[in-house]
Image: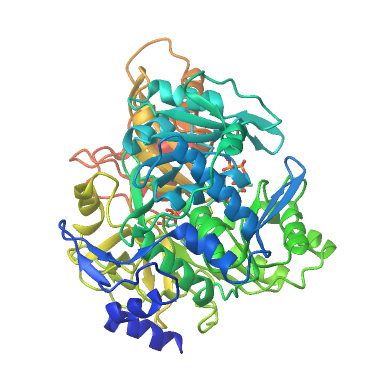
Amino acid sequence: MSYQQEYQSSIDDPEKFWADKAGLIEWFKPPRNILSTDENGIQRWYADGELNTCHLALDYHVNNGRAAQTALIYDSPVTEQKRTYSFRELRDEVALCAGMLRHYGVEKGDRVVIYMPMIPEAVISMLACARLGAIHSVVFGGFAPPELAVRLEDATPKVILTASCGIEINRVIEYKPLVDEAIRISSHTPDCCIVLQRPQANASMLAGRDHDWRDGMENAKPADCVPVKGTDLLYILYTSGTTGKPKGVVRENGGHAVAMKYSMSAIYDMEPGEVFWAASDVGWVVGHSYIVYAPLIHGCTTVLYEGKPIMTPDAGAFWRVISEHGVKALFTAPTAFRAIKKEDPNGELASNYDLSCFETIFAAGERLDPPTYDWLCETYKVPVLDHWWQTETGWAIAANMHGLEPMPPKSGSSTVPVPGFNVQVLDDAGSQLAANTQGFISIKLPLPPSCLTSIWGDVNRYKEAYLQTYPGYFATGDGGYFDEDGYLFIMGRVDDVINVAGHRLSTGEMEEIVGKHPMVAECAVIGRKDELKGQIPMGLVVLKNVVDVDPDQIVSELIAMVREKIGAVAAFKEALIVARLPKTRSGKILRKTLRSMIDGEEYVVPSTIEDPASLDEIKALL
Ligand code: COA
Ligand code: AMP
C-alpha cells in the first residue's frame, strides 16, 4: 500500500484502521471496543482488550520459535563488558525479577521507580513490572536527588530499583547516596529499595529497607504474566513542562504495544530477527520505546550500550558496535553525530569496520540541522532519516515511512505525518495555515494509540496543558510549517522547553531555582544555540540592591544550585548579571527578542518595550 492510501485510511476511519492494526499483536482477549470515551471525556484505545506487554516482548517469542535468538546485547565499553541474552534467558530473568518484586509486595497497578544506569537489570526491571501489570517510572540517572524526590512524591512507588553506581566515561557516579537523599527529602517513603551492587562501587544498605538484588533474585519464584486491560498503564515517564513540576506522561499497554509493533515495520523497515540499536538511555522515551519495547515486541535483537558516541574510547565507537553486532538500523540524537563530527570530521574511523550490515540512520530528539544532515549523508552513504516525536506520543508523529513507501528526504524536514496523526499547522486563533507559513503544530483528535491520555493523577492538567488551547486538537508545543509538497518542518518549541543534547529541559524550572538565591531579584533563562548540544541554557540575572557582592561568586553559586537541584545534565554553566531585564510595559519578559539577540539573529524591538536600553546593555555583554 502507498503511504498516501495508508495515511488517508487512518484519517478517514481511525477505528477501522486501528482495529486492523490491533491484529498485529497477540491479545489474551482481543478488543471489541476499539475507541471509546472515558468518564473524563478522553478518547482511549482498546479499553476492553486484554494483553500483557511482557508476554508480547518475551514469552510470545519463546513460544513461537525465537527462544534461542538473541534478544538483548549488552555492550559496555565503560566496564569492558559484553553479554547477550536469548529470548528464553531474558524471559527467565524477567520472570524471576517479577517474582522478587511480588515478594516485596508489588502487585498490578502498583508503581515502581527504576533509577538505574544502562545495564541489563534496567531492562529486566521494566519488563518485570510489565509482567506483573505494575506501572514503572524510570528516572534518568543524570537527574539529581530533588528531581528524583519530586517523582517519588508524585508516583508514590512501593519499591525503588537501583544500582550502586553509574559510569560516566571514566567517572564512577554513586547512585545509592542520591537515592537515599531523594527518599530523605521526599514526603513519600517507598516500602523498600532493591539495590544491584556493581563491582565499581559498594552501596551502603539500610537494614530493613534496602535489599540486595542478587539475594532477591536467588530466592525469587518466577512469576507469570498478569493480564491487563488495554487501557491499564504500562508506565509513567516524567518530562519537562513549562513549570518546575514535571509532567507524568502516562502510557497505556494496549495502544502502546500496537503502535510499537506497527512502527517497527512501517517506519523502521525492520524484520523480526534483525538487529536494531537505539543509542539513547532507558531514562528517556526513546529508550523506553526503541531500546526496550518495540524491538522486543517485533522479535528483533536490541542493543543496550553503556557508553558515549565519543571517548569510549573514541569517535569510532558507534561503528564498532554496528559492525560487531550486525546492526541494521541505528537511531540516535543529532547531538551524538555532532560530537562524532567534531572528533572525526572526515568520518575516517568508520572505514576501520565492516559496515555491510548497516542500512539506515534514524535521528530524533531534536531538529536534525541541515549541516549535520548533509555531513551524515556525504560521510556514511546510507539513508539518514529525521523523524519527529515527543515523550507524549511515545512514537513518531512525522517520519519518512521507510517500510511503507520511502520518500526522497528533504534536509531540515522530518518528512510526512505518520498514519494516525492528523497534523495541522494553526495560527493563534486556531485556523489552519497555508503551506510555507509557520504556526503552532497541532494534532486533530483522536490521537492515535500510544499517546498520553492523562498526566498521572491530574487529568485537568492534561486538558489544560494540551487540549484547551485549540478545542478538538492536541497542542504539541512545537512550531513549524508544511511546505508545498506536504513535508513537515519542525522549527522548535513555542514554549519554555529547551533541548540540550537531546535532553528535554524546562527553562521555567531553572528560573525557579535561580530565583531562590537570596541575592537574586529576578531572572530569565534562555535557550541559546550551541554547536554541539543544539541548545544550552543561559541565565540573565538581576541582583538585589546590595553592596559588596562578588558577581562571579554569585554566578558560581547559581551554577552549583541548578546542578544540585536538577543534575549535571541541565548543563547550566553560563549566567550574565544584568541591571534589568527587557520587558513589555505590561511586565512580560521579551524572551523571543532575547533569544534572537543571543543567537546573533536579526530581531525586532517591540514597540511595547518599556526600557530599550535594557536590551542594549545585554547586547554589549554578549
Ligand atoms: N548519570 C549521571 N550523570 C550523567 C548521566 C547519567 N546517566 N548522563 C549524563 N550525565 C552528566 C554528564 O557526565 C555531564 O556531566 P558534567 O557536566 O560533569 O561533564 C552532564 O551530565 C551532561 O551530560 P551530556 O548531556 O551527556 O553531555 P556531555 O558533554 O557529557 O556529552 C554528548 C555530550 C553529545 C556526547 C552526549 O550528550 C551524548 O552522547 N548524547 C547522545 C544523545 C542522547 O543520548 N540523547 C538522549 C535522547 S535521544
Ligand atoms: P522529548 O519529549 O524529550 O522526546 O522531546 C520532544 C521534543 O524534542 C519535541 O517537542 C521537539 O521540540 C524536539 N524534537 C524531537 N524530535 C525532533 C525532530 N526530529 N525535529 C525537531 N525537533 C524534535
Q: How many marks?
A: 0
Residue most extreme to the right: 352
Coloring applied to the structure: rainbow
Q: Using the rendered view, name the quadrant where residue 165 is placed.
A: top right
Please give the name of the residue rendered at 38% of the width and 59% of the height, measured from the top-left corner.
253
Please give the name of the residue rendered at 31% of the width and 71% of the height, measured from the top-left corner.
31
Figure quarter occupied by ligand 1: top right
Q: Using the rendered view, name the quadrant where residue 303 is placed.
A: bottom right
Q: Nearer the viewer, residue 545 or 486?
A: 486
Answer whether residue 562 is visible to the viewer in this image.
Answer: no
Q: Position of residue 474 (x, y in %)?
A: 27, 62
- 351 relative to 366 in the view: left or right: right
Answer whether residue 608 is visible to the viewer in this image.
Answer: yes
Q: Nearer the viewer, residue 281 or 220?
A: 220
Please give the name of the residue rendered at 46% of the width and 34% of the height, measured from the top-left corner.
160
Q: Nearer the viewer, residue 299 or 576?
A: 299
Q: Using the rendered view, name the quadrant where residue 447 is placed.
A: bottom left
Q: Position of residue 522 (x, y in %)?
A: 32, 28
Residue most extreme to the top: 548
- 311 relative to 28 in the view: left or right: right
Rendered position, 365 above or below 66? above
Rendered position, 122 above or below 58? above
Q: Nearer the viewer, residue 142 or 117?
A: 117
Q: Position of residue 527 (x, y in %)?
A: 44, 45
Q: Position of residue 595 (x, y in %)?
A: 40, 47
